Structures are given as structure tokens and as C-alpha cells.
């Protein structure tokens, strides 16, 4: 499968999480334009910017995608990744919170919590051990210095010829 097609297929995952599941679990998607809607729209926008920015970094610098079937070949630790190890998922969670507010939806909020729990388990049991195998000490140092979920106040910097800054 060529590179462009792999990138296109990798967009299936966020589409399912942000569109398919919310529409499937929420029977009445009613929008009321109020302050809660405005805050939700802003959060959804910020989340989508995080997602687009981090996915773009994976493609341009890491030479891979957000999808597990096309992982990055280089460790990406710059930009948003210098503040938090999982800014892509943070973006998705932020967008889901925005959707929760836009649609005043308890069920989308439950999906947000479920998605967070699934990813927390996945990262600890599968993704992080895989990153240690692929990138070794370089990833371990990054992991020691950059938190999984709560961003640092200042970006982490390390000089390395193999990491993408």
C-alpha cells in the first residue's frame, strides 16, 4: 500500500471515534446555541487542531501515521509532543468534550470517559512497551521527562540526532 493511501486509511480511526460512535450512541443530536455550545465549539476546534497538527507531524517528521498499521519510523518529540506524550489523544478527548457540550450529551461524555480508559490501558500495556522496543533508551528518556496526560509547563528539549525536533 503506498504512503498516501496509508495516510488516508489512518483517518478512519479518528472519524470513527469523533463521528461514527457519537452519532450511533446519541439518539437525539439537538443543538441549542448558547454559551455551552460556544465553549463546546471552541473545545472541539482546539481538539481538531491538536489532532491535525500531531497527525501531520507523524507524517512529515516521523514518516508514519497515527494508525498502528503504519507506525512512525522516527521518534517525534517536538511541538506538542515536547509538552505531553499523547497530544493526539488529548486532541481527540478535547474534541469529544466539545461534542459533549455542543449536543448537551451525557452519552457522548460516557464515550469520552470510555475512550480515555481504553487508551490508558492500551498505552501502558501495548504502545509504550512497543516504543521501548523500537526506540530504546531514547524513548525511555523521553518518557522520564514528558508526562503521559498532563502537559508540562515548558517544553522538554534534548539533543539527539535521531529524534525529530
Image: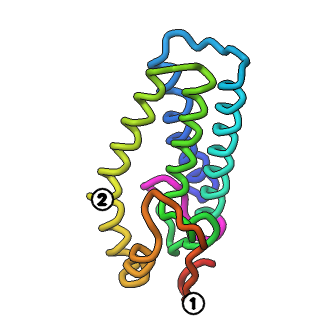
Between 83 and 135, the one lying in front of the other is: 83
Position of residue 67 in the picture relative to residue 157 (left or right): left
**Rendering coords of residue 156 (x, y %):** 56, 77
Part of the protein shown in magenta: 60-70
Q: Split into 4 quadrants, where in the image is the C terminus?
A: bottom right
Residue drawn at the location 48% of the way across and 52% of the way down:
67
First-in-chain label (1 vs 2): 2
**Can you identify the residue that label 2 sits on?**
124
Q: Which residue occupies the extreme left position in the image? A: 125
Mark 1 Cα within 10 Å, few/some/many (few <14, many 20+)?
few
Magenta stretch mostly in which secondary structure? Answer: loop
Q: Report the number of discs.
A: 2
Between 107 and 122, the one lying in front of the other is: 107
109 vs 66: above or below: above
Image quadrant assignment for residue 158: bottom right
26 vs 82: above or below: above
40 vs 14: above or below: above
- Queried whether the magenta region covers residue 62, the answer comes back as yes
**Can you identify the residue that label 1 sits on?**
159
Element assignment for label 1: loop
- Queried whether the magenta region covers residue 137, the answer comes back as no
Amino acid at each position: 500500500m503506498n504512503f498516501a493511501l496509508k495516510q488516508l486509511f489512518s483517518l478512519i480511526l479518528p472519524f470513527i471515534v469523533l463521528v461514527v460512535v457519537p452519532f450511533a450512541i446519541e439518539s437525539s443530536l439537538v443543538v441549542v446555541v448558547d454559551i455551552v455550545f460556544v465553549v463546546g465549539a471552541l473545545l472541539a476546534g482546539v481538539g481538531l487542531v491538536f489532532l491535525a497538527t500531531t497527525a501531520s507531524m507523524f507524517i512529515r517528521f516521523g514518516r508514519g501515521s497515527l494508525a498502528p498499521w503504519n507506525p512512525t519510523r522516527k521518534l517525534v518529540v517536538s511541538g506538542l509532543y515536547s509538552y505531553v506524550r499523547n497530544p493526539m489523544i488529548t486532541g481527540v478527548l478535547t474534541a469529544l468534550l466539545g461534542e459533549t457540550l455542543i449536543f448537551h450529551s451525557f452519552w457522548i461524555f460516557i464515550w469520552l470517559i470510555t475512550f480515555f480508559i481504553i487508551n490508558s490501558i492500551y498505552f501502558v500495556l501495548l504502545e509504550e512497551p512497543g516504543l521501548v522496543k523500537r526506540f530504546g533508551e531514547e524513548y525511555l528518556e523521553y518518557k522520564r521527562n514528558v508526562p503521559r496526560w498532563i502537559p508540562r509547563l515548558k517544553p522538554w528539549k534534548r539533543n539527539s540526532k535521531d529524534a525529530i525536533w
